[in-house]
Amino acid sequence: MLEFDPSDDIQALRSTFADIKAVVDVPALEAEIARLSEQAGAPDLWDDVEKAQKITSALSHRQSELKRITDVERRLDDLDVLVELANEMEDEDAAEEARREIAELEDIVGQLEVQTLLDGEYDDRAAVVTIRSGAGGDDATDFAEMLLRMYLRWAERHKYPVKVMDTSYAEGAGIKSATFEVDAPYAYGTLSVEAGTHRLARISPFGSADKRQTSFAAVEVIPVMEEAQEVDIPESDIRVDVFRSSGPGGQSVNTTDSAVRITHIPTGIVVSMQNEKSQIQNRAAAMRVLQTRLLLLKREEEAAKKKELAGTITASWGDQMRSYFLYGQQLVKDLRTGYEVGNPAMVFDGDLDGFISAGIRWRKRKSEED
């Protein structure tokens, strides 16, 4: 006789899911979707292309958020039917299918629960991620390219739209830097815990002495913000350089000098864009990112000043936030949370959800302690 009673697991799922729905406020979300849908249906919507893109993007984000909720609700209802069928028919195959469905729902509900912790000012926004190689020569530039692929694979796993905005290739292996946008709900709040210095330790494939090589790469994450236009940047404060886009090894990609590099002279911040079709589009995209960085820099300086006046200056992330060991004991370990995985290949293939969830929970605890 088949003994299959997952009622405790299902009840735990339903309880957690009920809390999630309360935090998300589904009626308010549905009202927001109705409002945006009305705006998106206006006959003159595309008379203002920039405004239209903001409306349609916001609508898509909200619809995606609601779909995740309704999909889980439907699957929980279907799960009850599947369990009942397995017990009535004493069908082990149906029971095994129910076990797999419970495991999948536990993972999805866990991700949704973590998302409820994303209550920062910009957490619900899309994200712009920049990866820069650090110390370590060819190993560092190769590591930067490994990280780029890791994040692109993570986004692909979640079916998040990604747009690579700029790539600067190294003369040897890998890349000097890359910037890409993840256009998904809560992309910034989710990926912001990945910001910091990443360290790779391995036997270098570029040396002949078979010695261990340590290299570094920095990850920066900023939100895509409508408020960016609030930052006024005088033309005298910027230097604009135009150059030809290039691929690996310096191969020409564009037939015109359409790539743009903007340097903000007072702060030294540099933003490059080369993936749009025209120089005008690349300049506009670069200015948006520069405005966002300057706005965030201003807010960080204000926050640091407040902490200084309060006498509570503390480092929030440290110089190294994660280490990747590809020799001896294969391991990836987050130095803030203690979360680790003994399969680096899986992590570099985009399996980052465990690290991200642990980082979000850690950040929430730290903010509550402060």
Image (spheres, rainbow, N blue to C red):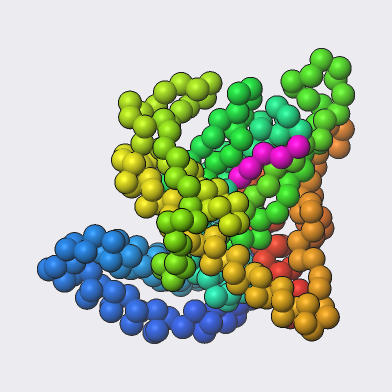
Quarter of the figure with the N terminus: bottom right
Query: Where residue 341 appears, x then y in whole percent?
Result: 76, 48
Quarter of the figure with the C terminus: bottom right
* In the foreground, 132 or 184: 132
Query: Where residue 302 appears, x then y in whole percent?
Result: 65, 75
Up-down relation of residue 352 to residue 103 (above or below) = above
**Magenta residues, as a range?**
131-135
Q: Is residue 269 left or right of residue 216?
A: left
Query: Where residue 69 appears, x then y in whole percent?
Result: 45, 71
Residue 202, quarter of the rendered image: top right
Let me know if residue 259 is in the magenta part.
Answer: no
Q: Is residue 74 left or right of residue 336?
A: left
Q: Is residue 144 left or right of residue 250?
A: right
* In the foreground, 181 or 6: 181
Residue 16, quarter of the rendered image: bottom right
Up-down relation of residue 96 to residue 327 (above or below) = below
* In the foreground, 266 or 136: 266
Instruction: Name the chief secondary structure element in magenta.
Output: strand
* In the foreground, 290 or 202: 290
Taking the spot 87% from the left edge, 24% from the top edge, the residue there is: 211
Taking the spot 86% from the left edge, 37% from the top edge, the residue there is: 329
